[in-house]
Amino acid sequence: MKKTVFIALLILTALSSCVPKEKKYFLKELTFSESITPEQKIKLSAYLIPTDQQYEWQKLELTAFIHFGINTFTGREWGDGKEDPILFNPTDFNAEQWVVSLREAGFKMIILTAKHHDGFCLWPTATTKHSIQSSPWRDGNGDIVREVKNACDKYGMKFGVYLSPWDRNAESYGDSPQYNTMFVEQLKELLTNYGEVHEVWFDGANGEGPNGKRQIYDWTRFYHVIDSLQPKAVKAIMGNDVRWVGNESGLGRETEWSVTPLNPDINETIITENKRLNINPTAKDLGSRNLIAEAKTLYWYPSEVDVSIRPGWFYHPEQDHQVKTLQQLVDIYYQSVGMNSVLLLNIPPDKRGLLHEVDVARLKELGIFLKNTFENNKINNGNIAWSAKSGDFKEFTNNSDIINTVMLQEDIKKGQRVEVFKIEGFINNEWKKLAEGTTIGYKRLLKFDDCTPSKIRVTILETRDKANILAVGAYRAPAIAANSDELNLSDLPKDKWRVKNNNPLIVDLGETVSLKGFTYKPAVEKESVFNYVFSVSEDGKLWTELKKDEFSNIKNNPIPQFVKLDNNVVAKFFRFETIIGTDGGKPSVTIDQIGILTKD
Ligand code: FUL
């Protein structure tokens, strides 16, 4: 009997929350009582809202990632932790140069890789010798974290830290309690000695493979350290405030819900629940009605789009001509900031300790583009908030200006609600559809061809509860000149190549060449090669092994891989053997995926 009364009370509490008049909001997390209907769940989900930290973070829109460390000096993407700290020696380090370029481009925060997977610490730490204290830079007395933080403070830039949980150097890694204590010490150093920190980024990567060390992280303890030392900071990726968008290519989702049953896999309950719902950060659907109907708990867990301005996360001189074009950056901006996400764009400093000239120039172009596009809202009264039931619309007059972009914002402090909307323009006395979409959230940007409507009409077609529209904007983005630099993946044409064996791939090049390296292009939607051996031969009988290595980070960032050899090698045959793939298999490779480099 008592139990029945209790359940009834629970249901009543949940249902009373469905009454909008009460304006009962749920901060960051909402657990449904059992036996409420899917419709009621949807209505409640409309009242889930971000914490202050999450809201402040979302408003930054543009955050810069800085991958800098021992890999900058070895040319690798993932160091193995055995690198000699002596290699770390930037010749012209200047954190202010980074901050000034980034600030001009519109960035509001910088996240620095204080420690990447190689375990090399960019600050003097008491936890390991594997740090800049053991490097020749500033005779071991330097502190990169301090200098970056000082530069950020000087120019009003917020500061965040990336501290890799996976550590290939720490001896204790894999001995869970001991390593967790070391990791907590590292966190404490970073979060007590450098002033305010606004984001702590925990990478999910762990490339140890099936036979590697297994570390069981104490996430609850890590979270507690952050929350108590830096209450304004958001915890990202393996943290439960900010979600990884699910790829490293700069692609947001057309339908992007910040309200989702997904949380990072940090404890058994969450892992089991994510499995039951068949969701993970790469899933296409993280917030549909069907998913919510199945969910027990929902979180405010907004997406962050991390992508590098170059193919790699670290600086490699051979990628100087592969810095993303302005068009690519602008597309990324529309697909991230314009799709209810924060853009975390990586700009890796070079061996001098400076952002490279090409990157600086590109940042400048991006800053100018964004300013030129978004500084003038062409419609009137776009900044007056309004609310809408499904089917409601609002019109805005345009002062005869050409437009090609519309911006919509929901007031996410009152939840995320809009499910379908359309935008029309009044052109030659009739309404024409300019764009349509699903979610809005914090910000939605939509592009269409240049036109000059005398007014535009925004219709909220479906919404989970009364939608709160904060702002509407219409803009003219300037045209961007086309750039057709195609990436060369092979210096040798393949018409003379003869495949001698498929797995491992053995190829007769048809001529003897002086080989300088090779390329590997991951196949689309197929398992990629992770560990490989590359060998060559002059006669197809006697083989020389040239490289036995890994394509670091290829799983999350499946871009063409360039492998340069230390010395030229004469060869008529090559053999490419997969040791293990990114999913533990042994994927075969075709000649379409391999290129041979013979030029500098
Ligand atoms: C990945 C890492 O493995 C990459 O090296 C890089 O740091 C990227 C941001 O996250 O998971």
Image (spheres, rainbow, N blue to C red):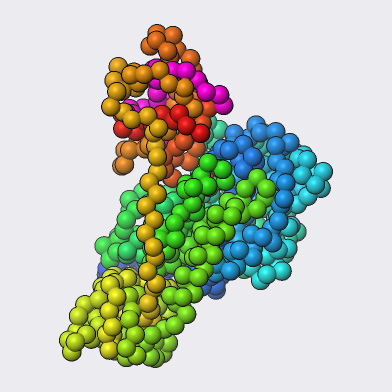
Examine the structure image and report whether residue 393 is included in the region drawn in magenta. Answer: no
Residue drawn 77% across and 44% down? 137
- Residue 254 sits in quarter: bottom left
Q: Residue furthest left?
A: 430
Percent of width and height locating residue 125: 75, 47
Percent of width and height locating residue 494: 31, 28
Please state which of residues 71 and 553 is positioned toward the viewer in this rendering. Answer: 71
Residue 360: tell me if it is visible. Answer: yes
- Residue 29 sits in quarter: bottom left
Q: In the displayed structure, does residue 25 sit left or right of residue 276?
A: right
Residue drawn 56% across and 46% down? 314
Residue drawn 44% across and 26% down? 532
Please state which of residues 356 and 257 is positioned toward the viewer in this rendering. Answer: 356
Percent of width and height locating residue 538: 42, 13
Please state which of residues 186 and 469 is positioned toward the viewer in this rendering. Answer: 469
Q: Is residue 334 above or below residue 573?
A: below
Q: For the N terminus, which image quadrant?
A: bottom left
Q: In the displayed structure, does residue 305 sit left or right of residue 56?
A: left
Q: Which residues are magenta?
A: 566-589
Examine the structure image and report whether residue 567 is included in the region drawn in magenta. Answer: yes
Percent of width and height locating residue 8: 34, 73
Residue 262: tell me if it is visible. Answer: no
Residue drawn 37% across and 69% down? 479
Magenta highlight: main SS = strand
Q: In the displayed structure, does residue 367 sit left or right of residue 334?
A: right
Q: Is residue 209 above or below residue 241?
A: above
